[in-house]
Image: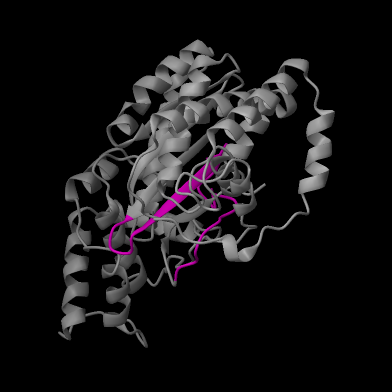
Amino acid sequence: MRSGIAELPLHTGHVPPWLASRMERLARIVLKILVDEYGTKGALERFADPVWFQAFNNLIGMDWDSSGSTTVTTGIVKEALNELDLGIKVAGGKGKASRKTPDELKVIAEKFDLPWEEYVKMSRLVAKVDSVALQTGYQLYHHTFFLDEEGNWAVVQQGMNPEEKLARRYHWFNAEELLNPHKGVAGVKRDFALNTVDIDSKEIQKTIIEIAQEGKKVAREVETIKAMKKGYMVFYKPRDVDVAGVIKRYESLGKIELNVKALEFARELAVEDYESFLLIRGLGPGTLRALALVAELIYDVKPSWRDPVTHPIDPFKFAYAVGGKDRVPFRIEKGIYDDLIEFLTRLEETKNREILKRVRRITERWKFPEEEKIPTF
């Protein structure tokens, strides 16, 4: 199992009603078997695994390389779990639906007799981490929060980079601290990322909080750095540092700008931990970039620039279950899809798992023809 990040090309289009209805029926059956076999916690662990999630997406017929797979698949799972009583519910979604997450989480947590404030806070924190604490040029537009009756949680959220026409998906599961919270990552590794939640980020986190407490002094230090970039003589200048090069790296992620009011809030609240700091309203990516830049050039405390990405096994083989929406690796046939639903329904009703295990032994070493793995549009 890996939980982390997946990267996909941006796609447009929609799923036709005849296919969407079948996807939901198949998803319901798979979810029943999944919870029956692994429990609710095991099911959430799998949704927190970007490779398993992509395989599930391929299994129900979504395109293997489409950014839309995230929004469609999580939407279908949300609807399926709302209809089923499996001990798991989902809040949030794409765009406007993501802003309903707190209200939906409150209803779900109260149904499970769980402290809803804790999960609403975690939802906000996860979104802040992947948009502020970890910056790679992606803007979040999709956020779904999975919660089970035992209090386990998982998050699947997605950001987009319109310039590069790529989407990046972030997966979380029961994270307990803000040091390498994604645990494992799947996607395309980038040259650098402003990563203040890397495994060795305790010092930069502490320094950023301390700098934020200085209020308006930080604004003067940012102006000092801008003067250094222009070549002006200043009282302090780091030795053997390419100031212009360092600033250029930060600016490649966006503007260097401070929200002084957010810093005032941090000082008034006497924030001491990074989690509480990130949750301050008004603290955006521009402000964090400015604080990290001051930490690096003025206080010589550098953030990590490591993009937390690994390269797991590609789950394209699962697209051969029913085919792909855009006919890769082949066109979806309604009859075959219906036969699969009927077959799995019978297995689910009889609780006969031995047949599934035998099929798995047949297919687990099968490798698809590489020439059939082509991009969809």
Horizontal arrangement in the rendering, residue 222 relative to residue 332 (left or right) = left
Horizontal arrangement in the rendering, residue 350 relative to residue 290 (left or right) = right
User: Please, is residue 145 above or below residue 370 in the view?
Assistant: above
User: Please, is residue 169 above or below residue 38 in the view?
Assistant: below
Query: Could you say which is closer to the camera, residue 370 or residue 218?
Result: 370
Q: How is the image coloured?
A: one colour
Query: Could you say which is closer to the camera, residue 174 or residue 6?
Result: 6
Query: Could you say which is closer to the camera, residue 369 or residue 119?
Result: 369
Rendering coords of residue 6 (x, y %)? 50, 53
Magenta-drawn stretch contains 184: yes
Residue 58 shows up from this direction: yes
Please tell me which residue is depicted at 31% across the width and 56% down the height of the picture.
288
Magenta residues span 161-190
Query: Could you say which is closer to the camera, residue 351 or residue 332?
Result: 332
Q: Tell me the quarter of the picture where residue 359 sits.
A: top right
Please tell me which residue is depicted at 15% across the width and 84% down the height of the picture.
232
